[in-house]
Image (cartoon, rainbow, N blue to C red):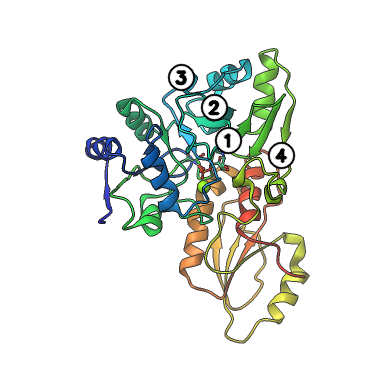
Amino acid sequence: MKTSIRNPPQALAAALAILSRGELVAFPTETVYGLGADAGSERAVRRVYQVKARPPDDPLIVHVCDALQAREYAGDFPAAAVILAERFWPGPLTLVLRRGARISPAVSAGLDTVAIRAPSHPVARELLSRFGRPLAAPSANRFGHTSPTTAQHVLAELAGFIPLIIDGGPCGIGVESTVLDLCDDGARILRPGAVTPEMIADTLRRAGLAAKVTMADRHAGDQIGGWKSPGMMVRHYAPQTPAYRFAAAQGPRVRRWLARQPADFHMALLCFPDCPVLDQRERRIILPPEASACARRLYAALRQADELACSAILVQLPENTDGLWTAILDRITRAAPELPP
Ligand code: TXA
Ligand code: MG
């Protein structure tokens, strides 16, 4: 199958025809590119799993125009969902709610819940409003790989597997949406993103709702049978080259590790501007020291490092852990295990 990259608005008519036939279209969102399928078509949804090589028990996010459409597909829409959708939709917040009867069980991987969000990217909005029905859309990458933030990244992942990629330019946020579980009592963040726990708690508090927002245990994803959100699996968003993370304070560990490497070893170093030179054989890719710029750049930088075909990639962890840095830290931690001592 030939995969074409086309610009909006011309690409939209073609995209609608393809989606209506039960085939897949990659489209831009403000977070990362999505691999869209008619959420009402069992066949289209199955094709998503097949194309991504995604395990059948890892549920997809359903994309809608707005809260009104979300209400038609969720089993219930609790007060917290109403308030949060009003404040953060369209935008990078996914709500996990009870699954309604109109959502194919395949989308939810058999769970009785469904993850729903209304994206804010104008191309995604136009596509959803003209399609008139929700689109199931995971990130448009092969399972476990780095999420795509440009149309060219999608092509690198899925060329030959899908007919069309709509090119909406680079994604503005660059890391996936915050996933918030509202099914049990309270609000629990399953995946950190641009909508932070503070923003959620603050919004709920102002509305007079209980404002306790908890973070799911990030290792819970590894407990067989007990996992709530498979995207929490520890190894995820990973480049192909062996990649390791390190903190600024771990200079001695990095130097010990480098000393053990063979003579032909050369590394790609993803680091912040103040990182000292660690090795003569490093190829340096700088991550911006400001959180939103860093999030926007992170996945492209990981891909760039991968393309250098080095022996290994070393990624520096940010020192700051608040706000959007939590999501950046989470993605680096999943993309790259800790450097061995
Ligand atoms: O920003 C985003 O959310 C992007 C764009 C394309 O919208 N999408 C995305 O989808 O990141 P995906 O499939 O790569 O990640 C979906 C995450 C996974 O961690 C999945 O396990 C979780 O959402 N999820 C989906 N349905 C769920 C459910 N019913 N309960 C708990 N977690 C769920
Ligand atoms: Mg993904």
Q: Secondary structure at mark 4?
A: loop
Which x, y percent locates residue 22? 31, 39
Task: Provide the residue designation for mark 4.
Answer: 216
- Residue 223: x, y in percent? 71, 49
- Which residue is identified by label 3? 72
- Residue 36 appearing in the image: no
Query: Where the N terminus falls, by quadrant?
Result: bottom left
| Labels 3 and 4: the sequence-earlier one | 3
Residue 96 drawn above or below residue 36: above
Residue 220 visible? yes
Residue at left 62%, top 61%? 315
Residue 262's x, y, as percent?
A: 63, 85
Q: Position of residue 10 (x, y in %)?
A: 22, 38
Q: Earlier in the sequence, mark 3 or mark 1?
A: 3
Q: Which residue is found at the position 68% from the left and 46% from the top?
A: 225
Disc 3 versus disc 1: distance between alpha carbons? 18 Å
Q: Earlier in the sequence, mark 2 or mark 1?
A: 2
Amino acid, disc 3: Glu
Residue annotated with mark 1: 111
Q: State the CA–CA distance, disc 3 to disc 2.
A: 10 Å
Mark 2 CB near ligand 1 (8 Å cut)? yes
Q: CA distance from mark 3 to mark 4?
A: 28 Å
* Crowdedness near tag 1: few (<14), some (14–19) or many (≥20) residues, C-alpha within 10 Å: some
